[in-house]
Image: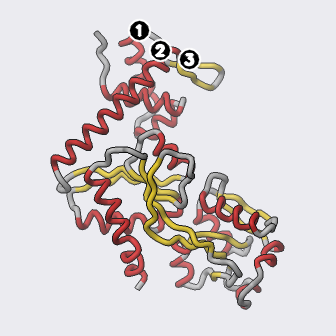
Amino acid sequence: MLHLTLRQLKVFESVARYLSYSRAADELHLTQPAVSMQIKQLEDNINLPLFEQLGKRIFLTEAGQELYQYSRAISQQLADLEVALDELKGMERGKLNISVVTTANYFAPHLLAKFCQRYTGVTVSLNVSNRETVLKQLSDNLIDLAIMGQPPDHLDIDSQSFMENPLVVVAPPNHPLCKEKNIAVKRLASEIFLVRESGSGTRSAMERFFAAHEIKINKGMETDTTEAIKQAVQAGMGLGIMSRHTVELELETERLKILDIQSFPIMRYWHVVNRKNERLSNVANTFRDFLLREAEVLMHESKT
């Protein structure tokens, strides 16, 4: 009879998913030696190797592939059990696992705070990543809900928009275009743009916009944070395109200006997303409904 622990299976599932001990350790908030020890104990229990190393990379053995399928099924059953228990508790207690794309981190904590003030027994696990990572977390069943821009059509997910997400062109206050109105889009072809990394929803929207207008833009610095772009724009390194939600403070303190460009803002929407046909917990359902009903009003009130 096998003597496996849920902890060992959780650690194994994470290592198998990433094919990396270090990334699994980061996700589980463990040291790498602790992860290695759990895998070694699991291999000793089943008397079969689960991973093989080729060079610096690890791969699942045949036994590892078999166990990975079962460990994912067990993880899903445990998640379903947690949902069922939460439903018995009602909304007095429960946990919400949510991931948001980097840009949404400028407003998501405010909405989560309002929600937790109303439902004081709820605990929240918030992860902030780029679009591709958030979608993978959804696919791997690691989170209940995600907040992002327009999700891709080909994934098996449910998505509902809950708030406008206008993308604007920002410049330092001393930029010559700040003095002009109704600027033609084609004039942006001579400007340098500071851009987010590939996989960012903002970057994808920007590239689709300029491709539709047959404009090839000059890309300057590329970075994985909106904060770095804002700082670089303020320093005069170029222009930026970003969600208006991310620059409210800079606009108020006049460290950045929004340029009056034709066809801008690019109007997008924020979406709350979950896996299709998934049984959501009471907490996740209630938070999704909260976003759909109240997010836009609450964000407007926070600015007045």
Instruction: Tell me the CA gap for discs 1 and 3.
Output: 14 Å
Mark 3 or mark 2, which has the lower sequence index?
A: 3
* Relative to 251, residue 212 above or below: above
Mark 2 / mark 1, whichever is N-terminal: 1
Q: Amino acid at mark 2?
A: Ala
Determine which of the numbered discs, if any, sits on residue 63 in the image: 2
Q: Badge 1 is on which residue?
A: 47
Residue drawn at x 37%, y 65% is: 291
Position of residue 245 measured from the top left corner of the image (x, y, whole percent): 51, 73
What mark, if any, has residue 52 been given in the picture? 3
Quick one: quadrant of the N terminus? top left
Q: Residues within 10 Å of mark 3 (few under 14, many from 20)?
A: few
Which of the 4 quarters of the picture holds residue 176?
bottom right
Q: Mark 2 Cα within 10 Å, few/some/many (few <14, many 20+)?
A: some
Residue 262: give x, y in percent of width and height: 71, 81
Color theme of the render: secondary structure
Name the amino acid type tagged 1: Asn
At horizontal 67% and vertical 82% (from top left) the residue drawn is 259
Q: Secondary structure at mark 2?
A: helix
Instruction: Give the image location of residue 31, x and y in percent.
Output: 43, 34
Q: Nearer the viewer, mark 2 or mark 1?
A: 2
In the rendered structure, the answer to whether residue 262 lies left or right of residue 249 reads right
Q: Which mark sits nearer the N-terminus, 1 or 3?
A: 1
Relative side of 235 to 16, left or right: right
Q: Are marks 3 and 2 in contact (CB under 8 Å)?
A: no
Label total for image: 3
Say few, some or many: other residues with alpha carbon within 10 Å of mark 1 (under 14 / 14 to 19 / 20 or more).
few
Q: Residue 99's spot in the image, x, y percent?
A: 44, 53
